Image (tube, rainbow, N blue to C red):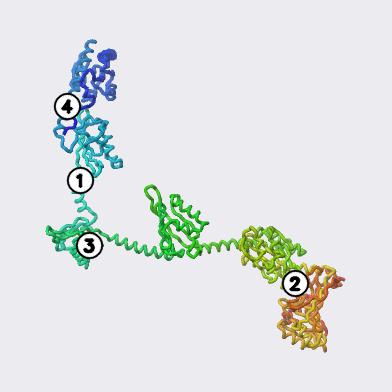
Amino acid sequence: MIGNGLDDVAFAGARQTDTASREIEVVYLDSDATERERTHEVLADHSAEITVTSVATTDAALEAAASTAVSCLVLDPAGLDDIPDPLVSNDRYPVVLYTDATATDSAATVFDDAETVVKKQGNEQVTFLAEKVVSVVSASVDRTESALRDALSGIESRAEADEIAVLLADDGTVHWSSEAVSAFVDGIDDTCRVERFYDAMATALPDTPGGRQQLQRLRGSPTEPVAVRVPGGEHDQYLLRDGYQLPDAAGGLTLVLLRDVTETARRDARSALLDLLVEQAQDGLYTLDERGVIDFCNESFAANLGYEPAELCGEHASTVLAPGELSKGQATVEELLDAPEEASTTVDLTFCRKDGTEREVSINYTLIRDEDGNYNGLIGVARDITERCEREREYQEMMERLNFALEGAELGVWDWNPKTNDVTFDERWTGMLGYSRDELDPHYETWADLVHPDDLARAEQALGELKSGEIDTYQSEFRMRTKDGDWRWIRDIGKVFEWNDDGEAIRAVGIHQDITEERKRQDAIERQRDELVTLDRVNVLVQDLIRALETTATQDEIAETVCDRIVDSELWDLAWIGERTGTNDSLIPQTVAGDDGGCLDAITSDERTESGPAETALRTGTIQTTTVESGSEGASWEAAVGERGFRSIAAIPLVHGDVVHGVLCVCTDQPDAFTTRAVESFAVLGEMIGFAFTAVQNRRLLSHDSVLELTFESRNPDTPLVSVANAYGCRIEAVGSVDIGPNHLLYLSVDGGPADSVSEQLRSHAEILDSRVVRADDDGGILELRVADTIQSLLLDVGARCRTLIVDGGTLSITVEAPLDADSRTIQEALTTCTPDFTLTAKQECEQERSAVAVETDPREHLTDRQQEVLRTAFLTGYYAWPRDTNAEQLAETLGIASPTLHQHLRRAQRNLVAAVFDMQ
């Protein structure tokens, strides 16, 4: 049994029994310095194996003894105070007294603890002292070896087959073992000699927190019982370590006994485990005999039902089963009896607790049979699943609510493994794009292929940040292609829920939400906001232009001011005003501001065969807007887009009344730049420019000495005046008109025909709102017609005025005065509002007839517009004739005012005229 013989013992250098070869460390304590020096030299010179450390005090001696491996202490107690017991009373080294003192002169304990006493008597005695030291040290070593041999013999005699004894130094060095440690401990390489016990155990124990803790207990508690588990191939090895500290006489070593308790540990573990499973298992355990009576149950089973085990043993199973559950349990036993190949089965039953409450319990039944195979009862393992059932119900309800919420919110769910790129899409996810689940491959590339190319990089960057852990929650918005080829805006939100041991994301879950309508609303809001900002700037520009028109004197100045300020606003990059030329509707830009970019060349090209927005606006008198995209197929004027990408164009007719003086064209690179409200603002601007153009023409007409006289004739018998004149063979001539607000009063003289009949027939025409006879003569008279427009009002809109209007011999002849550079076609178009077939029959330049009264002294300047209207109407209706053709009541009715108001206007107008006349004298 003993692996190593006792002759192999090695401890503290004790294998060297030859005194000559043994090193002896001597500590010499003497308070006499002279004697101490002399003795030190003799001892050191006596033998090379003797090393002497001389000290003068007990403290120095204690320090030397603690720091060196002392073989012998030599001291002279004379002259020393109390000598500490630890210095002289220990098993580490012998004590030799070298002194002239006697026991009565010093503490008796020092002499009792000393091995021998040598008297101080010269150098010869010092030599004797050296020999005594060698002798005493050798004897001490022999006693240590003998004690150690006796101890090892005892260990050898009691060693068992499953036990090994090991002698260890303080640093864990193996000095002896009853057999090879490497052969006894499974986890140590048996080809290596074990030098240090704890290092060898470190290789045998697992490099885990538990293994390191076991090694620490072995090192830190060398004499306490410690159990360790050494991992093995098929089975682990269990060792029990006991330690014993040997006395100093035996070398101060530690005896370690290692016992292999693997089988015992396994047996005890199985037994303890069974007891633990039965008594302390959370699952309830019970047995029933063949009658269904409980003959055993553990604490868990009873406690779960509110009983003590003793209360249930001997009771029938029906005691703890809810009504109707016994038959269900019996049916389960019958199924097992009918199927002998089935070892066990599980059934869920409802149990009734002692307090009357019910618990859901899952029972695993295993039948017990006797030696003959007959049914002898059963073993039941009961697990309370009440909370699980409740959680399942809550989970089911939660899932129903979640599905309802997801369905109500139209949210699709995806489940992605970022490591494998496998993705699961639910039906709402796929259905959102018009697909079924079977039509889409469950992989990352499926999603990537459906995302709009312009949005993919941004979405993938966000997913990469989620995958790497840079962000906790991923959110992105992008477009995805549907099965029909449309694009839908999707809001995608996700989060990583699982990482592997390498820190890699292996599961992320998220939702898809179709936000197409939301994006449309957002885009609409943004467009409205931008539109409001633009509209505000447009309105400011329009108001600024309207104010600027008040100070412009010519049409050229008006056009330049409008175009320059439109371009300076930086809202548009091109503005130009075109006017009609020739007899067709073609436009020639007269004033241009901004970046042309070839736009005008394309618009004014002679090769164009179709009408652009400007020509359409001129022809219809309505604003035309369009947006042209580069590369689109269409009219040749779309070449104006060039490389700009987009070109938005608005053509605004410059209108006054029914007359279109020209067209203002505004261009920009922005698509759909002209909204409805912006167009409304431009419509106001177009009317104001048209009014300004008309005002300029009228001023020019009044200020020039030479005018252009134009004569237009019509023989259309359907014209009311021609029709009446033909019917009665009379001559009709316009003698004046008055603007009375929404309508006009036209006064006609009738010559050679009945005034009453002419008036009545004129009233039958739709163009005549009303007609009455102001004065009737034998062969004519004066008529008052109420009409929507008069020839004079129409001509004023185009900067001309009517000199004469005569109907005679079936011909309506109108003589018009206009500026020398007036466009006769524009004037003719104004006249066609009344009669569509007017022709120009005469055109000449002539001197303009001037009033005898200078403009600056004209008494009419002292009258208000309303006063002039009332006086002119009174004059033309014969109110001032005698006898009066029209009385005050008739005049007031014609003007739509009360008689007192009429008289008030007349008195004030007459007073102003009289005052002006007398002021001029």
- Residue 459 visible (yes or no): yes
Q: Would you name the residue on which mark 4 appears?
A: 147
Q: Amino acid at mark 2?
A: Asp
Distance, label 4 to label 2, CA atoms, is 145 Å
Distance, label 4 to label 3, CA atoms, is 71 Å
Instruction: Answer with mark 4 or mark 1, whichever residue precedes in sequence.
Output: 4
Contact? badges 4 and 2 (CB < 8 Å):
no
Contact? badges 4 and 3 (CB < 8 Å):
no
Quarter of the figure that contains the N terminus: top left
Q: Amino acid at mark 1?
A: Arg
Q: Amino acid at mark 4?
A: Ala
Q: Which residue is most to the left? A: 372
Category of crowding for the residue at label 3, using alpha-carbon neighbours closer than 10 angstroms: few (below 14), some (14–19), many (at least 20):
some
Q: Amino acid at mark 3?
A: Arg
Q: Nearer the viewer, mark 1 or mark 3?
A: 1
Instruction: Answer with mark 2 or mark 1, whichever residue precedes in sequence.
Output: 1
The answer to which image quadrant residue 605 occupies is bottom right
Q: Nearer the viewer, mark 4 or mark 1?
A: 1
Q: Viewed as shown, does residue 181 lie left or right of 743?
A: left
Instruction: Answer with mark 1 or mark 3, whichever residue precedes in sequence.
Output: 1
Q: Nearer the viewer, mark 2 or mark 1?
A: 1
The answer to which image quadrant residue 713 occupies is bottom right
Q: Would you name the residue on which mark 2 appears?
A: 797
Distance, label 3 to label 2, CA atoms, is 105 Å
SS for callout 3 = loop
The answer to which image quadrant residue 62 occupies is top left
SS for callout 1 = helix
Q: Would you name the residue on which mark 3 appears?
A: 353
Which residue is painted at 72% across and 60% down in the image? Answer: 592
The disc label shown at residue 266, or none: 1
